[in-house]
Image (tube, rainbow, N blue to C red):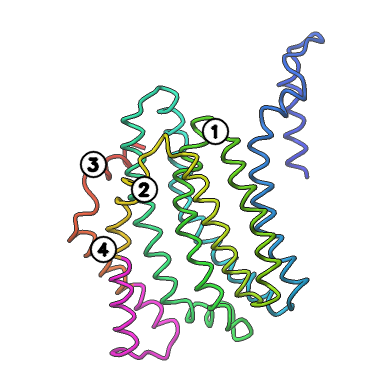
Amino acid sequence: MISQGFMWFNVKKLCFAGEGQYTRSFCQILDLHYPSFLPQVSITIYNTLDRIILGSLSSVFDVGIYTQAVNINSILISLVATLSAVLLPRMTNLYAQGKHEEVQRVMSSSMLFNSIITFPTVFGMLLVSQEFVHLFLGRQYAESYVAINIVVFALIPIAFSEIVGRQTLIPTDNVKLFTASVMSGAVVSIVLNMLAIPLFGYRGAAVTLVVVETVVCVLMTYFARKYLDIVDLLKIATKPLVASVVTGTLVYLLFSSVLSISNNLLSMLLKVIVYSIVYGFLLLLTKTISHKELSLLRKR
């Protein structure tokens, strides 16, 4: 509340030019910024209302299991969304200057790096979720790994939404379309949770979360289609996806049939190390990253 209070004190500087003259009305300021406010409200709705519905239609146990899974997933989302936050000012500047070829180049590199981070995060989490839960959450939340293994798939549409939403719709002044996508997700979330939770409990809420993020991603992709070559972006994600699946399969087979480690910490660390080495080797083998993409990050 204190931080918000300081913000509203500064509104005076935007409204008054001095000597009783108004530069703009309070309503004009709200009109400028409410489109950015509505998406946050919608995101908050389907990120919190699902737990309220879960608590009303299911049990406290289900709420605890689901909440822990969502909290862990939120940390992973922060990792995936970092690149989008870095590139947003650059994308806005490029769109403003009309440099469409440069936009396509930066967008392709953004898709590549998002894919390189997202896919191994998803499949890596599937491999270590049980050990992670036992180490950091305890036996009372042992079932959380089931919810984690479901909600972690939401990272994939979220990562793509960062590209077609935050890096495309917002810089091109299509905030209303961005808002419509997110608000549609909120509506779908409420409807599906009301249907799925009474039947499947926390599993239904977890699946709903993935479906909602996919719906939002599809809508944003549809709205951004005239600014981006969607097919080319999906092709860029192919190599990291294949490398992640192959690596995940090899690591799973290795630790399930060859190496049997009872110590959770040691098992998790070895899986992460082996996964990183194999995945990195496959990226180099397939020449997924070039010097051009690396120079883009250094430039930013």
* Residue 99 at x, y percent in the picture: 35, 25
**Residue farthest along the right direction in this orientation:** 20
In reply to whether residue 269 is colored magenta, the answer given is yes
- Quote the CA–CA distance across marks 2 and 1: 20 Å
Marks 1 and 3, the one that precedes in the sequence: 1
Q: Quadrant of residue 271?
A: bottom left
Question: Is the residue marked by circle 2 packed among few (<14), some (14-19), or many (20+) residues within 10 Å?
Answer: many
| Residue at mark 3 | 292
Front disc: 3 or 2: 2
- Quote the CA–CA distance across marks 3 and 4: 18 Å
Front disc: 4 or 2: 2
What secondary structure is found at the residue carrying circle 3? helix
Front disc: 1 or 3: 1
Front disc: 4 or 1: 1
At x 58% / y 35%, what residue is drawn? 175
| Residue at mark 1 | 174
At x 39% / y 82%, what residue is drawn? 266
| Residue at mark 4 | 280
- Callout 3 touching callout 2 (CB < 8 Å): no
Question: Is the residue marked by circle 4 packed among few (<14), some (14-19), or many (20+) residues within 10 Å?
Answer: some
| Residue at mark 2 | 111
Say what amino acid the circle numbered 2 marks: Met
Question: Is the residue marked by circle 1 packed among few (<14), some (14-19), or many (20+) residues within 10 Å?
Answer: some
- What is the span of residues highlighted in magenta in the rendered image? 244-272
What secondary structure is found at the residue carrying circle 4? helix
* Residue 234 at x, y percent in the picture: 34, 51
